[in-house]
Amino acid sequence: MEQSTLTILALYALFGIALATLWLRHQSVLKQRGQMQIRLGDLQGNLASTSNRLDLLSRGVDTILGETPEVHELLSVHKSLESAELLLFEQDVTISSSESCAIATHAAKSILSNYQSDSETKGRVNILPGIIPLVLRLDAILTEAEMKSEDLELNGDEQRCLGELFHEAGKSVRAADFYRRAHTLSPEGSSVLYSLASIQRDEGDFDTLDRTLERLLAIDPDDVEVLKEQVILLSGSDDVRFNRNTRRLEALGVDFTISENQTNLNNIAGRASDVQSAINPHLKEPSTSEGWVAKSAKLLLLGEIVVALESVEKALYLDPVNPEAWLLKAKLLAAGDDRTKEALQSIRRASALGEYTVLLESEILENDGKLDSARAVLEEWLETNPSDAEARGRLSLVLFRAGAIDWASRVLQEAPPEAWDNASLHVMEGRLHLLAADEHRDRTGNHDHIILLDATISFDLAIEKDRESGLAWLGRSRALRYQGSPKEAEIALVRARRLIPNHPSISLEEAHLCLDTGKLDQANALVSEASTNLQNHPSIPFIRGMIAAKQGRFIESQTFFSKVLTIQKNHIRARLNRCSAALLANDLVTALDDANYLVEHAPELNLARQRRSEILMNLGDWEAAEIELRTLLSREPEHTMGLVHLGTCMIAMNKAEQAEKPLNDAIRYDPNHSDAWYQRGLLYLDFGRVDEAKSDFEAAAKYDSKHIDARLRIAAILHEGEDPNAAIIAWRKVLDIDPEHKLARRRLQESSERQEILKVRRYPKD
């Protein structure tokens, strides 16, 4: 009894504890609900307050901008700039240079849509409040994207308007760039030149200011203000234009006398140093040797070699031990004809006076055809200066051009560690890797991606050392093109063109890139551009031959490839492509000669053996073709076309029982190979296995929708059957490929007539 009582009491106690726990849990939930209600109330209050503030701000903005509703449009400009920044810099997807330019152009046009300017005025008008910060954002976008005015797809007026906005924003360099582009696109306008002149005047750039004023006079020869300014600019010189302008002002009835206080130009000139004044050839003659050297250097940049040489002679007359003058004289003499000996004498004088001359001396010797002397000069210098990276890179390049590839590579390997801090060695190493990649491709028909990766790493290291190395960007573009990355290659090539715009290899590399991406018209235009600077270069006729071949002009392509082989007899790709073009043009003799040459000189090139077997098959020499194909398959057992051709040979030699295995293997290795299915279908047709043959022909047509031979076989099989409707459908599919196919049209008519006869028999008249 006591045990039962204790049990009941225990149960009551447990029940009480459970109730107490539930009550406490309930109180806690109620408390939490109260706290949540308080928080929700606070949140609702905050939201209401924020909403009120936003409403107040919106009404305030509408009130403030009510008198200038056009400023509202700047919000859309802000959105356009935000989108441009997001697309250009804040996404992980790489975009092409053309897409980048289109994005930046859209952003620029959104700003221009809120700016009005009169092209006939000499100043800037109608600049909305708030547009200048947006212009500064556009400048930041263009700077980050490394774009210039020529990258934007704008007309002359739009370029001018942007130049005015950048000028107003204080971005003089950017404004000058857009003004120059606007003048290039619309050379008849004068307002751009006035704006450009104001920038040059502010910066004291008298040389370019003089040229701008001359352009203005070409547009309006009687512009009095321009005539006055140029007279002041040319004062103190013997320039014939000084007298021309003076006489023109007199003819216009303008009494003008030069005074130092008349314009800001004379004030700037008074503060300028003698050497700075000597830089401008149109100003007064220098009185120091340094001034004559500076003037000569300027004339050299302008291409006035004879006058520049006279100036440097005057510098040496005033100071016979001026090392810069001797070095400049060497450059000027080297630019002339048959003056190499005098140039070298000047270099030695400059070297004796402490100038760094080894690179210039080696370049002069190399240009004169004295490669051994150029190499000797560099080697002698490196014996005492092994860490000179520029000289070491130059020596490697000289050996590279002379064909001493191992020697050129060894020169780089012998460089001390500190020399590798220079970009030139990495560029040269990358070029050697690219040469090795070319040799591997010519030998085997495929690129070695390990070598290409090494080349890319070398060029990336060069760019890391010097991001302004145009040769490094050019080499990187080529390496990426070889790796099958055309978009990245295009980006690198754009950087290279901006850094070294006049380098002849830029156009060639861009033509190769367009050729690989199927832009044949652009490739043709670029190779024409390259041909103006490069004479007797094998890449020019090679690219033209590839363009002709891709356009189906095989006879013309053979001519171009023959030109390549005249320049470079062992050009493997040109000979291989000429072999293919000759085969397609049915010039089997030339094709066989080229194939034999390739098999002999590039025995590892499987494509050469494949071409030779195809030529032999076209000549009907099936046994020789079989031998060639078995040699090919012994090296590459999974060569699909080799297996297909071997099956074709077996069928042609009445060895049909031996043809099935290679054809089965070809289908197993490449189930999508239409020719393999077609050849096996022919084999089954010879065996009388019509259903299996038809199935293979259908597979061939499935994987190559233009395979007309497979369609013809299917239609012929169905034509012999009892279903004329199926035959009609099959013949129509043949005509879809070739609407002028006579046999298909005749058979289609026959099948249609059979179908009509069957209809009459099936439904006889009453």
Image (spheres, grey):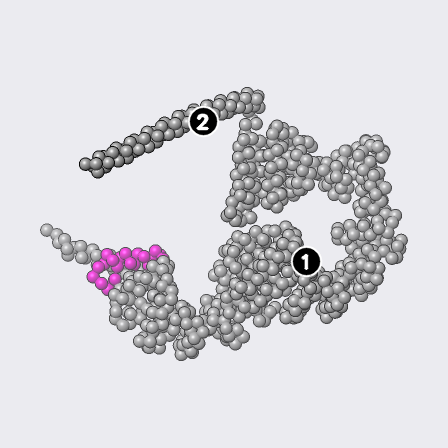
Q: Is residue 237 magenta?
A: no
Residue annotated with mark 2: 43
Q: Residue at x 76, y 66 (%)?
A: 384
Disc 1 to disc 2, how far (Cα)? Answer: 62 Å
Residue annotated with mark 1: 422
Q: Nearer the viewer, residue 325 or 452?
A: 452
Percent x, y of residue 534: 64, 60
Q: Nearer the viewer, residue 298 or 524?
A: 298
> What is the magenta segment's predominant secondary structure?
helix
Q: Amino acid at mark 1?
A: Asn
Percent x, y of residue 92: 51, 47
Q: Residue at x 61, y 42 (%)?
A: 142
Q: Nearer the viewer, residue 59 or 362?
A: 59
Q: Residue at x 63, y 29 (%)?
A: 127
Which residue occupies the extreme front position in the image? 2
Which residue occupies the extreme left position in the image? 766
Total labels drawn:
2
Q: Which mark is residue 596?
A: none
Q: Nearer the viewer, residue 275 or 623?
A: 275
Q: Does residue 380 appear left or right of residue 699 in this picture?
A: right
Q: Quadrant of residue 168?
A: top right
Q: Does residue 671 appear left or right of residue 495 in this picture?
A: left
Number of residues whose C-alpha sits closer than 10 Å to that of mark 2, classed few (under 14), some (14–19) or many (20 or more): few
> Please, what secondary structure does the residue beneath circle 2 have?
helix
Q: Is residue 735 magenta?
A: yes
Range drawn in magenta: 718-740
Percent x, y of residue 255: 83, 31
Q: Amino acid at mark 2?
A: Leu
Q: Residue at x 83, y 55 (%)?
A: 325
